[in-house]
Image (spheres, rainbow, N blue to C red):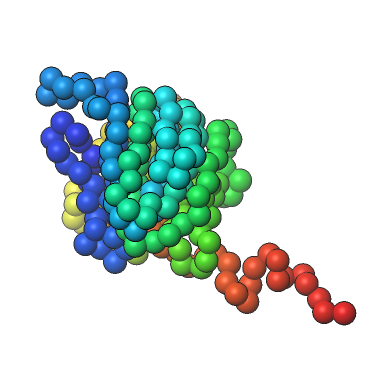
């Protein structure tokens, strides 16, 4: 598992994976090495950007805006400017065109059951089966997940609460990584991991670059339950 760190210039660059992706955290109020963030960045060409606004607001390349507590999806056709005030987490999926949207705020718990007492809600759906998606993952207090893996990377950002990420370094040793609001991380392909919470709950925005669920031309809500007379 890799943790994003602007101070140490540890960027979440996974552009060499099956589903080229990257992520970074931007904060216009933060002073690093004696200088402040200038409040703008540029998007990758032919990419979809997903994000969550921790504070302030964001002006997206398509003219839409999002404010604190909201999440978004936006297609970027070129090196377009993204302006922000406050703090925002950005996830980029290169070579994919999503659908523009802004949503939020989040609910208090997920609409769907997840493993070991957790829940989740699908925030940004895959337009077609296999496309990327973004979910909100809710961990109640005193959760100790089972170890599990995913076939592709998972990028997450902690938006509230706190917990611990546990990663198996080998058959015996376990590495524990503290998670607090604003932590941006990436789980490697097939990395054996789990999450734990103590007295606090924890909410994580989770990006999946691919999936096996979503509408198809032969199975979607408009077509289903349509009967020719």
Q: Quadrant of residue 178?
A: top left
Q: Confirm whether residue 193 shows in the render.
A: no
Depth check: give the residue in front, 229 or 2. 229
Depth check: give the residue in front, 5 or 90. 90
In the rendered image, residue 204, in percent from the top left (x then y), is placed at: 42, 40
Task: Indicate left or right for 176 with 161 as reference.
Answer: left
Q: Residue sitting at 18 percent across and 55 percent down?
A: 170
Quadrant in the picture for the C terminus:
bottom right
Q: Residue sitting at 40 percent across and 43 percent down?
A: 61
Please identify the residue farthest to the right as the structure is shown.
229
Q: Quadrant of residue 103?
A: top right
Task: Indicate left or right for 96 with 27 as reference.
Answer: right
Depth check: give the residue in front, 184 or 221. 221
Q: Quadrant of residue 90?
A: top left
In the rendered image, residue 96, in percent from the top left (x then y), is placed at: 39, 61
Task: Indicate left or right for 2 with 55 as reference.
Answer: left
Q: How many marks?
A: 0
Depth check: give the residue in front, 51 or 17. 51
Q: Confirm whether residue 158 shows in the render.
A: yes
Please identify the residue farthest to the bottom as the structure is shown.
229
Q: Residue sitting at 50 percent across and 50 percent down?
A: 100
Image position of 169 with respect to 151: above or below? above
In the rendered image, residue 223, in percent from the top left (x then y), is placed at: 70, 71
């Amino acid at each position: 598992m890799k943790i994003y760190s602007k101070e140490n210039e540890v960027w979440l660059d996974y552009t060499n994976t099956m589903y080229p992706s990257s992520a970074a955290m931007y904060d216009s109020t933060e002073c690093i090495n004696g200088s402040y963030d200038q409040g703008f960045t540029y998007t990758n060409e032919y990419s979809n950007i997903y994000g969550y606004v921790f504070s302030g607001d964001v002006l997206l390349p398509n003219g839409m805006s999002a404010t604190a507590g909201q999440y978004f999806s936006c297609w970027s056709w070129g090196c377009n400017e993204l302006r922000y005030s406050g703090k925002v987490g950005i996830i980029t999926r290169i070579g994919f065109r999503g659908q523009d949207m802004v949503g939020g705020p989040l609910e208090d718990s997920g609409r769907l059951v997840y493993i070991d007492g957790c829940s989740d809600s699908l925030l940004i759906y895959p337009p077609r089966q296999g496309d990327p998606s973004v979910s909100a993952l809710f961990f109640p207090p005193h959760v100790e997940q089972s170890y599990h893996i995913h076939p592709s990377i998972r990028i997450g950002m902690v938006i509230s609460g706190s917990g611990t990420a546990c990663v198996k370094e080998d058959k015996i040793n376990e590495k524990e990584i503290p998670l607090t609001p604003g932590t941006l991380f990436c789980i490697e392909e097939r990395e054996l991991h789990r999450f734990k919470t103590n007295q606090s709950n924890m909410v994580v925005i989770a990006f999946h670059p691919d999936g096996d669920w979503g509408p198809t031309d032969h199975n979607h809500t408009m077509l289903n339950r349509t009967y020719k007379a």
